[in-house]
């Protein structure tokens, strides 16, 4: 009996140590009550329930998969991004997050709003579709300029040191225009971060224009 009581006391102390604040106060109050088998059972059950809720409420952390680029720049003091893309890949639980920057000749790449992502960590095949704007343009028969929206669909493989695949770009506002296809290879920038490194994902669509947020796209079958 003495041995059993010692084990019960140790179990209760472990339960207390795992739950700070109000949870610990509740358990300490219970321990002041008359000792008995029912009280040991109740304390153990409460510890299990609180542990389960604590783990269930813990949010998934964002981890870096890699940064990749094939950007072409001009100028040293004030570089302009003339062509190419930046792709950043992150994992958050079972989700894959993608951020893509598109060169348009300015000092900063244009951030695209990613609409859909599919990534298989086993085959390392990546597919995503995004919408971005190249600025303002005049449509046929329209006096006021409009957003020059483009959809970018990608399908390819994530290699240890690069991403290789097909880029498909389509003019959203031009129903008769053909989709432009090109092969792309983006090299991984190793000094920008290590795979698996915890990172805060600050990129959201909140800063995009209303036209960009309202546009949608899907992965085109011809790029698979």
Image: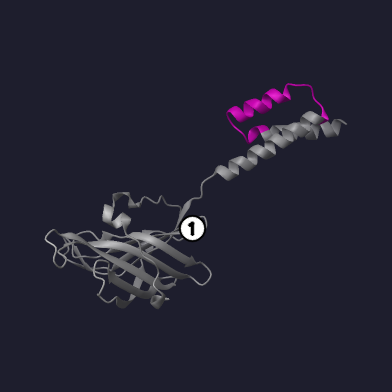
Residue at figure coordinates x 29%, y 50% from the top left? 207
| The N terminus, quarter of image | top right
Under tag 1, what secondary structure?
strand
What residue is shown with label 1? 95
Looking at this view, name the residue that lies furthest to the right. 1
User: Where residue 189 sits: x, y (%)?
Assistant: 35, 65
Q: Residue at x 52, y 58 (%)?
A: 94
Position above or below: 143 against 5: below
Q: Which residues are magenta?
A: 16-37
Q: Position of residue 147 (x, y in %)?
A: 21, 60
Quarter of the image for residue 85 reads: bottom left
Quarter of the image for residue 137 reads: bottom left
Judge left or right: residue 173 versus residue 119.
left
Q: Answer few, some or many: residues within 10 Å of disc 1's Cα (few below 14, many 20 plus, some between 14 and 19).
A: few
Say left or right for 139 vs 51. left
Q: Is residue 167 above or below residue 35?
A: below
Quarter holding the C terminus is: bottom left
Q: Position of residue 144 (x, y in %)?
A: 13, 58
Residue at the spot 40% in from the left edge and 58% down from the top edge: 193
Q: Is residue 27 magenta?
A: yes
On the image, the x and y values in percent for residue 118 come to 46, 65
């Amino acid at each position: 009996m003495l041995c059993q009581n010692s084990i019960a006391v140790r179990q209760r102390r472990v339960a207390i140590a795992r739950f700070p604040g109000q949870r610990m106060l509740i358990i300490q109050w219970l321990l002041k009550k008359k000792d008995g088998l029912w009280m040991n059972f109740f304390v153990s059950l409460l510890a299990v329930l609180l542990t389960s809720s604590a783990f269930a409420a813990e949010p998934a952390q964002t981890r870096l998969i890699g940064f990749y680029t094939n950007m072409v720049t001009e100028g040293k003091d004030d570089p302009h991004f003339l062509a190419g893309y930046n792709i950043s890949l992150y994992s958050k639980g079972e989700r894959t997050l993608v951020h893509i920057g598109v060169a348009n000749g300015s000092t900063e790449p244009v951030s695209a709003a990613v609409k859909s992502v599919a990534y298989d960590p086993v085959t390392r095949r990546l597919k995503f579709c995004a919408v971005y704007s190249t600025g303002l343009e005049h449509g046929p028969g329209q006096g006021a300029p409009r957003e020059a929206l483009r959809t970018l669909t990608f399908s390819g493989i994530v290699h240890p040191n690069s991403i290789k695949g097909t880029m498909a770009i389509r003019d959203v506002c031009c129903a008769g225009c053909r989709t432009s296809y090109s092969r792309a290879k983006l090299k991984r920038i190793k000094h920008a971060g290590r795979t698996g490194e915890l990172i805060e994902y600050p990129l959201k669509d909140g800063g995009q224009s209303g036209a960009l947020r309202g546009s949608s796209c899907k992965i085109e079958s011809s790029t698979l």
